[in-house]
Image (tube, grey):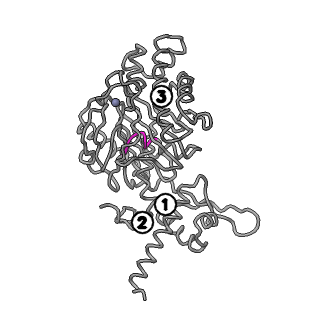
Amino acid sequence: MDQPSSRAARQESLREHNLALVAREVLSASRPLSRAEVAARTGLNRATVSRLVAELVAGRLVIEDAPVVAGAGRPATPLRPASCTVGGLGLEVSLDFLGARVLDLAGQVVAEEVVAGDHRASAAAAVLGDLGRLAQQVAGRAAAQGTQVAGSALALPGLVAHSRLLVAPNLGWREVDPAAHLHELPGARLRLDNEARLAALAELAVAESRSFLYVSGGVGIGAAVVQDGAFATGVHNFAGELGHVCVDPAGPRCRCGATGCLETFAGTAAILRAADLPEASDLSQVRSAVEQGNEKAERAVARAASALGIALAALVNLVDVSDVVLGNTLAELIEPMRPMVEAELSTRVLAAQWAPVSLRVAATAAHPALTGAARAALAPVIADPAGWLAGPGQGGFGKLSQ
Ligand SMILES: [Zn+2]
């Protein structure tokens, strides 16, 4: 026979499991759900759902809208994610800016700050020190509006593994432990990930498709492979380095040390150089030059588009996706590049005749990696609401903070 203590432990773990099921349905639904809908989606009975919803409401994770009368029977009370109660803090170090954004459970921006800067070949400690101060400021503004930051996540343009940045060639950073320089961040421990992957996470929240290849094109070019809502991260979390796929071994030297990487043809700096535009220009100026018939700009765009098409075709042949999403500044050039990228894809993708590849601009707003990072920071609350509610002072991840 069971010992009473082990039975109680089992019941507690069942409650935690069911609470997570209910939280996931309500917090990730595209519209408010009634208790009956939550019961149908989770397979739990109505009484259990009502009891668990009451816990989520009391814990300020879920709120009830005004009851809706529809036909006979009791009016349904729609449930939706609470606004301005619990938030995730998204942080980003980009080559051109530092950013901090707090997103609440409803997906709304509570507070944010983006500060322009030039971080090429920068000192990690100084830049991360600045980011830490920005994070404090933004978290403070969110707190003033009643939003408690549950945790934070940092987007970086490089290889990330085991809470360390191994290398970010364009920043000139190697072997950096960001948490050591970001003191006193609010909430649970800092999570790190690659910028393109976090931008793709933001795209996944708004895109119709659940399977796509996300390309973040700036000075560097990163990518994320999303299949049925899951990320292909690779054995070491290094997957997606599209910018260092070789498109011409005889091509220019890349910052990574190799030659002919995609970035040396389709990175912002490479396009501006080929178009004979000043280093401080942006790609909208290249687009304008193309529209005005500037031959150098046309050649620069054709060269970038052909390289991008060759690299994308290699990736599509390997992973079989039919939706390529172009994000970041390279999206400015999607229309002038489209014919050449599509020509490379239709020539080089073996299955193109049966599964044509479509190319579109990301649906997300500015700085999507900040939004993705904030979502990643909130993910532990959604995955383990019981842990969050049991935290010190209620709402603090007492069980997860180690
Ligand atoms: Zn390279």
The answer to whether the residues at label 1 and label 2 have Cβ atoms under 8 Å apart is yes
Residue at position x 32%, y 54% from top?
189
Q: In which quarter of the image is the N terminus?
A: bottom left
Please tell me whether residue 321 is drawn above or below residue 20 in the rendered image: above
Q: Residues within 10 Å of mark 3 (few under 14, many from 20)?
A: many
Please tell me whether residue 343 is drawn above or below residue 292 in the rendered image: below
> Can you tell which of label 2 and label 3 is closer to the viewer?
3
Q: State which tag comes first along the sequence, 2 or 3.
A: 3
Q: Residue 61 carries which label?
A: 1
Distance (Cα) linking label 1 and label 2:
9 Å
Q: Quick check: 272 left or right of 78?
A: left
The segment highlighted magenta reads: 193-199
Q: Quick check: 206 left or right of 167?
A: right
The answer to whether the residues at label 2 and label 3 have Cβ atoms under 8 Å apart is no
Q: Quick check: 22 left or right of 174?
A: right
Distance (Cα) linking label 2 and label 3:
50 Å
Distance (Cα) linking label 3 and label 1:
46 Å
Q: Is mark 1 within 8 Å of ligand 1?
A: no
Quarter of the figure with residue 157: top left
Measuring from the top left, give residue 342's x and y in whole percent: 56, 27
* Ligand 1 - quadrant of the structure image: top left
Q: State which tag comes first along the sequence, 1 or 2.
A: 1
Q: State which tag comes first along the sequence, 3 or 1.
A: 1
Q: Residues within 10 Å of mark 1 (few under 14, many from 20)?
A: many
User: Residue under circle 2?
Assistant: 389
Amino acid type, mark 2: Leu
Examine the structure image and report whether residue 197 is included in the region drawn in magenta. yes
User: Residue under circle 3?
Assistant: 310
Measuring from the top left, give residue 29's x and y in whole percent: 57, 55
Seen from the viewer's position, the closer of residues 127 and 233 is 233
